[in-house]
Image (spheres, coloured by chain):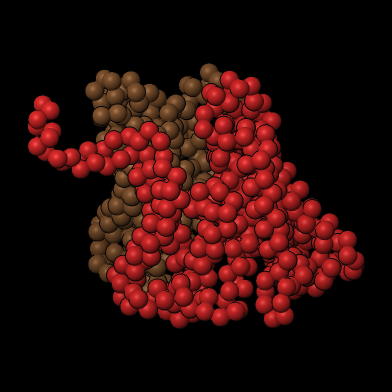
């Protein structure tokens, strides 16, 4: 007989172990889907997970894609830890890119060392302002932040669309929906010749360290964690809930804005419609897979970045659509959430005889 | 372009057609949310419905199988969400997002061999009446059966929620799962049913797009309609009749854009496209500001996990 019991406390080793179970199950699940679709599953999985990072260029691409995911997820971890459901990071990324890109366009024909820092700051500021909208509406009007932040994703994407086809479109661009190229002074310095990996990765690493410091070494971090565990306790302890909500949204928005500005000043170099392949949504998976822990998020961002990269490789070698990466991303989150059941419940196999005796 | 009376009739007819997927998906999601479950996977379930409907149509050449199959595939995919959130007690928001991401990916994989295949023409009803009666003809006649069903659905949903015992149970489960459970109602079972029903309606909404509205398969062809449907449920403050009105407004905005572009109107189309989202935020602010209003309108336990100690 099987009995399911609620656990009193979550074992910490299991807490960090279940993401690995989820990854293994995802790979198995992916193999099964490939098999059903008529591919050799071993070969398909090899194209998906090994071929992309088998050379230096691929490894640089992996880090390139992990950078925005890591940045956004770090920001989201502040929101999620404190029970604030900001799921509009994609919008904050877009708005950050719009503000940062706007500054870069102002300086399109100028050179100077001060331009890139200005563009980066503008991007972070843009994301922060945009994240403040759901935060302010939540704190002062009691609106649901899930729905507001989600709606704003589409508003920001439409704004970007308007700008690149309308007022900001390249005057010499034959009506393509894109802006001018940014000047070299607005571009992230590349780290190695011939590879696309750029200095934005240092922003992500700095975010990891700063967030670790804030979460584990400051009073604010303590407040965030307590509010996440129990809102009642937080209120009883006299924490100023409203300020904290605004702060976590600002941190989260600024990180997403940085990710956006990193993309447009890094690999892209201008504004157009497709600045992000839904990094803002995928980063939610990264945050969960990394257990909202700064160092866990580094690991998770690399895993999820590999699904993007794998999908691109598989598209070339197996002629499967690039959206295949999303199958893996969705499965990772499904399996991770499902395996969380093991954290909160103990599954006991009872000996029938003993049971009878007790009765 | 002259604004004569028959043109307005055609315009209203096309607004109705564009609002059908929104009505279907939002009506389904409304029942799910009324039972206290927030399923953000609408877009994913719709796109799975779209590819299953289209694929079944191409393979079997049978409209009935295609339509029923699309609803069934919506049920199957929503079963993943139901199992995770109800049996494994996972977070609704995260699970729903995973469902959307997964659904878009899976539909593209399944639809790989269906890209570029022309769709079949879906039979329309009363096509002779559409031509012969000015103004009312294009509004009332010449639509597919799915459209007539969609326009009846909000009224049926309203009747179900207000007048039937089961509807009362669904509302009770959404507003107060603990007391419903104490009354001997199986909360988890009711929520499962509501989730699966939502999946079926989203599947049908997707099939409407790939079989009737634009009969073909394109990757990611739902193009955010699932999110608009989600917004619509909130915009309608969880009331089925307002879903119908809202869908016509949101659908009208889509059609209006096309015509405004044609006559070279000065308002940017992107602003019009953003209107549904902005209006939803405004409605949210208006209903949420007043705690009494939000209690009257929102299913109280929406998105919260229900766990019964055995």
Q: Position of residue B188 (x, y in %)?
A: 29, 34
User: Is residue A197 visible in the rendered structure shown here?
Assistant: yes
B83 relative to A161 in the view: left or right? left
- Residue at the spot 68% in from the left edge and 38% down from the top edge: A218
Give above or below for B3 relative to A264: above
Residue B192 versus residue A187: which sits nearer the camera? A187
Q: Quadrant of the N terminus of chain B?
A: bottom right
Q: Position of residue A106 (x, y in %)?
A: 86, 60
Query: Chain A drawn in what color?
Result: red
- Residue at the spot 67% in from the left edge and 45% down from the top edge: A213
- Residue at the spot 29% in from the left edge and 64% down from the top edge: B56
Res. B112 image quadrant: bottom left
Q: Position of residue B47 (x, y in %)?
A: 41, 57
Give above or below for A173 relative to B163: below
Residue A72 versus residue B265: which sits nearer the camera? A72
A42 relative to A86 in the view: left or right? left
Query: Chain B drawn in what color?
Result: brown
B193 relative to A181 in the view: left or right? left
A220 relative to A83 in the view: left or right? right
Give above or below for A39 relative to B173: below
Give above or below for A253 relative to B106: above
User: Is residue B12 visible in the rendered structure shown here?
Assistant: no
- Residue at the spot 67% in from the left edge and 77% down from the top edge: A195
Residue B67 versus residue B299: which sits nearer the camera? B299
Q: Position of residue B127 (x, y in %)?
A: 36, 55
Q: Quadrant of the C terminus of chain B?
A: top left
How many circles with numbers are drawn on the protein?
Answer: 0
């Amino acid at each position: 007989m099987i009995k399911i019991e609620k656990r009193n406390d979550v074992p910490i080793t299991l807490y960090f172990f279940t993401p690995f179970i989820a990854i293994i199950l995802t790979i198995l699940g992916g193999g099964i889907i490939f098999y059903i679709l008529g591919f050799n599953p071993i070969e398909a999985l090899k194209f998906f997970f090994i071929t992309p990072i088998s050379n230096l260029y691929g490894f640089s691409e992996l880090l390139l894609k992990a950078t925005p995911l890591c940045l956004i997820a770090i920001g989201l971890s502040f929101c999620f830890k404190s029970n604030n459901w900001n799921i509009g990071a994609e919008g904050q990324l877009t708005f950050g890119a719009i503000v940062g890109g706007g500054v870069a366009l102002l300086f399109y024909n100028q050179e100077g060392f001060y331009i890139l820092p200005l563009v980066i700051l503008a991007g972070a500021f843009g994301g922060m302002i945009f994240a403040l909208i759901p935060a302010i509406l939540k704190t002062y009007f009691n609106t649901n932040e899930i729905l507001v932040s989600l709606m704003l994703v589409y508003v920001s994407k439409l704004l970007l669309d308007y700008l690149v086809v309308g007022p900001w479109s390249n005057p010499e661009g034959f009506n393509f929906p894109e802006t001018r190229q940014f000047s070299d002074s607005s571009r992230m310095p590349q780290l190695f010749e011939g590879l696309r990996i750029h200095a934005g990765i240092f922003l992500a690493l700095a975010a990891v360290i700063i967030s670790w410091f804030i979460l584990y070494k400051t009073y604010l971090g303590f407040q965030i964690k307590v509010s996440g565990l129990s809102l009642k306790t937080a209120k009883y302890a006299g924490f100023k809930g409203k300020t904290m909500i605004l702060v976590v949204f600002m941190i989260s928005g600024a990180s997403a804005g940085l990710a956006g500005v990193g993309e447009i000043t890094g690999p892209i170099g201008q504004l157009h419609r497709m600045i992000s392949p839904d990094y803002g949504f995928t980063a939610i998976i990264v945050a969960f897979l990394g257990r909202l822990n700064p160092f866990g998020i580094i690991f998770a961002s690399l895993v999820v970045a590999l699904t993007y990269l794998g999908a691109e490789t598989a598209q070339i070698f197996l002629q499967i659509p690039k959206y295949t990466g999303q199958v893996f991303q969705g499965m990772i989150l499904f399996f991770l959430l499902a395996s969380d059941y093991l954290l909160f419940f103990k599954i006991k196999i009872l000996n029938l005889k003993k049971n009878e005796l007790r009765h | 372009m002259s604004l004569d009376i028959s043109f307005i009739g055609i315009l209203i007819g096309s607004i109705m057609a564009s609002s059908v997927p929104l009505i279907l998906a939002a009506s389904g999601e409304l029942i799910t949310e009324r039972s206290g479950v927030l399923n953000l996977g609408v877009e994913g379930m719709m796109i799975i419905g779209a590819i299953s409907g289209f694929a079944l149509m191409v393979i079997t050449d049978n409209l009935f199988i295609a339509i029923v199959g699309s609803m069934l595939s919506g049920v199957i995919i929503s079963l993943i969400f139901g199992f995770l959130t109800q049996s494994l007690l996972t977070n609704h928001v995260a699970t729903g997002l995973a469902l959307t991401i997964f659904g878009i990916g899976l539909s593209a994989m399944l639809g790989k061999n269906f890209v570029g295949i022309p769709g079949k023409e879906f039979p329309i009803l009363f096509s002779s009446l559409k031509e012969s009666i000015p103004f009312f003809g294009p509004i009332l006649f010449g639509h597919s059966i799915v459209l007539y069903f969609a326009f009846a659905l909000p009224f049926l949903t309203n009747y179900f929620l207000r007048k039937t015992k089961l509807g009362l149970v669904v509302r009770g489960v959404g507003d107060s799962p603990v007391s419903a459970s104490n009354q001997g109602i199986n909360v988890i079972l009711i929520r499962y049913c509501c989730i699966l029903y939502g999946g079926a309606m989203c599947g049908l909404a997707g099939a409407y797009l790939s079989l009737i509205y634009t009969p073909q398969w394109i990757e990611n062809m739902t193009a955010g309609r699932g999110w608009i449907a989600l917004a619509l449920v909130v915009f309608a403050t969880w009331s089925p009749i307002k879903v119908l009105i809202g869908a016509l407004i949101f659908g009208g905005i889509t059609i209006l854009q096309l015509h405004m572009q044609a006559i070279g109107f000065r308002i940017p189309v992107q602003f019009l496209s953003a209107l549904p989202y902005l209006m939803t935020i405004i409605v949210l602010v208006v209903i949420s500001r007043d705690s009494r209003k939000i209690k009257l309108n929102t299913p109280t336990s929406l998105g919260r996990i229900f766990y019964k100690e055995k």
